[in-house]
Image (cartoon, rainbow, N blue to C red):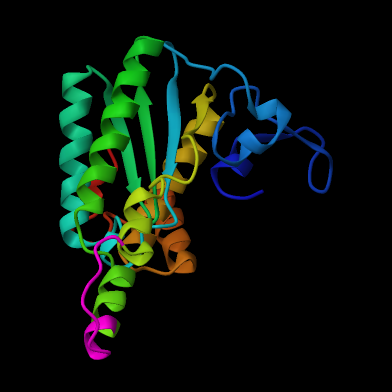
Amino acid sequence: MSGPEAMAKTNTHGSGSTRRLHPSAYGGMLRNRRCGRGRRPISIIYSMHIVLRSTLARGKWSFAGDQNREMIRYVLAKHATTCAVKLIATGNAGNHLHLRIQVASREQYIHFIRAVTGEIALKIKKIIHPERELARSKKHELGCAPDESSSEQISLKEKNFWDRRPFSSIVGTLRYATRLTDYIKINQLEGNGISRAYARLVVQKWRDGTWQEFEPGTAGEYG
């Protein structure tokens, strides 16, 4: 297990020891495990870490594309306002989004997540996907008439855009909040085409106070 699911785990005995899941971790790959099912833990006191992932988000459907990046910023800001959700930080890593939010109720969380995931998926799917474009060009080269009912034309549209239900975890400690802040910054830099190793270096220098600001056009998304 890696990524946010791993971050939400607690190592109780140091390196190499048995690790247990953070009690608030829910969704994502954890849905495949018994401990990751049931009712999603929601906090109205602490902020929450949310991860939205789609393996379809590549090429023209990538979240990191300029137009898609701006669209996602707009959608998040719009629904944060309409749902009265505090959007603390966001990270766009191309095929997944990291959000740190503060909600006042379970209903508020549900409304926000449904609105955001629904609108992003709808807008992305309106863009012609490279695989569909390739299928059309091949048919054109072979002199075949386009078949709008063919599987290659409709399969991507009918497929669920999001891989799984959102991963979530409650940011209940200062240590988790600090690690999450760094993790989101690293992912944001990666989404802008910067290598992970360099992104880690930049964030570490920022923590040390030796790096004044991030790459142009990225600092404003960190909250």
Residue drawn at (56%, 48%) of the image: 3
Q: Nearer the viewer, residue 70 or 177?
A: 70
Q: Position of residue 175 (x, y in %)?
A: 55, 32
Q: Is residue 10 left or right of residue 84?
A: right
Residue drawn at (22%, 17%) of the image: 84
Q: Is residue 148 magenta?
A: yes
Which picture quadrant has residue 29?
A: top right
Q: Is residue 177 visible?
A: yes
Asked if 73 appears above or below 108 in the picture, the reply is below
Q: Is residue 73 left or right of residue 98?
A: left
Q: Position of residue 124 (x, y in %)?
A: 24, 52
Residue drawn at (22%, 88%) of the image: 143
Q: Nearer the viewer, residue 143 or 11?
A: 143
Which picture quadrant has residue 129?
A: bottom left
Which picture quadrant has residue 148?
A: bottom left
Asked if 133 appears above or below 47 in the picture, the reply is below
Q: Which residues are magenta?
A: 139-149
